[in-house]
Image (tube, rainbow, N blue to C red):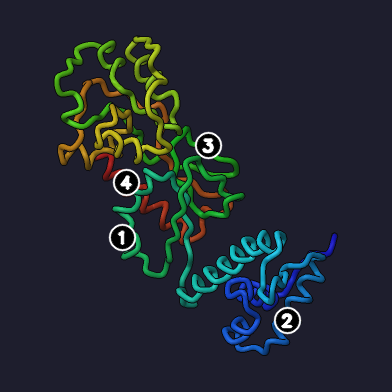
């Protein structure tokens, strides 16, 4: 195995401080080191990288192109180390960390409002939530739990169905003012908000009703259902979304359903965990809790 090119953390700190202050003296004062010690660290770093990092122009320091490029990478590394270290400081010796991956809108609309109940019941479990529009690969993403919409299959995972999600069109109450929507043709001629993660949504919605439209893929496009819902509230058009994700806006009257057809779910929301971790206490507790919360959701 080839030896890694690993400068010391001290050298990286010295380089970042000098680059920020453009002064060896001020960097030395900040790091409580001598100026000569700072200079030595920079010299060793430049020797390791085989590139000069600073130039002296008219008695003033200036980053070289290589130095400027390296600075952006070094800051990422130092910030990451700082965040990780502060992260560990927040935990006691008895605390377990449960990392949950969820699709953004589902996490914001379903998981987070219920999460305080889980946290109150399990104070020994520290929750960390990450979001991604696509389902997480449990092993590659290094997460314990994945909450996702689909057909229940993830590589190396065991999935439990939570509930299905019927789909409805929604728009702002005044968006349809003066417009008559009495046929699917009328509906298809409106501005149809597109969700990037479900590009076939409007096509499927019309097809379920045995109607074909050449406008199924036309309209402003947003990355997530949450953005689509907000766009509908703002009057950008009609969004097609799982009804459960827009319940808050529908109940408040800021969104209405302009066409009564409810499309049956073509998949379901699942909770998944790796096959070998089914009996890990923190995972078993969360899965049991999620299934209980899902049963309450289905009962509404």
Q: Is the Cβ of the residue at disc 4 closer than 8 Å to that at disc 1?
A: no
In the figure, residue 70 lies in which quadrant?
bottom right
239 shown above or below 125: above
| Mark 1 burial class by Cα count in 10 Å: few <14, some 14-19, many 20+ | few
Residue 91 drawn at (x, y percent): 46, 74
- Which residue: 35% across, 16% down? 206
What secondary structure is marked by label 1? helix
Residue bearing mark 4 = 109
Q: Which of marks 1 and 3 is nearer the N terminus?
A: 1
* Residue 185 as seen in the image, left or right of residue 150: left
Checking the image for residue 39, the label placed there is 2
CA separation in Å, label 2 and label 4: 53 Å
Labels 3, 4: front one: 4
Labels 1, 3: front one: 1
- Which residue: 35% across, 39% down? 227
Q: Which quarter of the rendered picture does the N terminus lie within?
A: bottom right
Q: Which of marks 1 and 2 is nearer the N terminus?
A: 2
Checking the image for residue 153, the label placed there is 3
What secondary structure is marked by label 2? helix
Residue bearing mark 1 = 116
* Residue 113 as seen in the image, left or right of residue 36: left
CA separation in Å, label 1 and label 3: 28 Å
Residue 146 drawn at (x, y percent): 48, 47
In the figure, residue 188 lies in which quadrant?
top left
Q: Earlier in the sequence, mark 2 or mark 4?
A: 2
Checking the image for residue 269, the label placed there is none
What secondary structure is marked by label 3? loop
């Amino acid at each position: 195995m080839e030896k890694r090119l690993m400068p010391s953390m001290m050298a990286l700190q010295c380089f970042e401080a000098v680059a920020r202050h453009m002064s060896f003296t001020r960097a030395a004062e900040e790091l409580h080191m001598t100026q000569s010690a700072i200079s030595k660290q920079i010299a060793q770093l430049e020797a390791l990288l085989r590139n000069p990092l600073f130039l002296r122009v008219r008695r003033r320091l200036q980053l070289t192109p290589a130095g400027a490029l390296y600075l952006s990478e070094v800051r990422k590394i130092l910030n990451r180390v700082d965040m990780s270290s502060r992260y560990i400081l927040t935990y006691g010796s008895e605390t377990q960390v449960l990392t949950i991956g969820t699709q953004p809108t589902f996490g914001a609309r379903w998981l987070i409002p219920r999460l305080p109940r889980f946290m109150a019941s399990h104070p020994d479990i520290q929750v960390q939530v990450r979001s991604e529009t696509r389902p997480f690969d449990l092993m590659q993403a290094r997460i314990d739990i994945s909450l996702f919409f689909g057909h229940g299959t993830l590589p190396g995972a065991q999935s439990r169905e939570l509930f299905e999600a019927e789909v409805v069109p929604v728009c702002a109450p005044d968006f349809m003012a003066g417009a008559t929507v009495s046929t699917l043709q009328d509906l298809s001629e409106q501005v149809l908000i597109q969700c990037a993660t479900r590009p076939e949504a409007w096509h499927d919605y019309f097809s379920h009703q045995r109607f074909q439209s050449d406008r199924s893929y036309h309209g402003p496009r947003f990355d997530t259902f949450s953005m689509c819902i907000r766009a509908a509230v703002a009057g950008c058009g009609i969004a097609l979304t799982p009804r459960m994700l827009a319940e808050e806006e529908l109940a408040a009257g800021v969104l209405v359903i302009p066409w009564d057809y409810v499309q049956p779910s073509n998949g379901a929301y699942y909770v998944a965990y790796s096959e070998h971790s089914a009996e890990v206490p923190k995972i078993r507790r969360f899965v049991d809790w999620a299934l209980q919360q899902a049963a309450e959701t289905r009962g509404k």
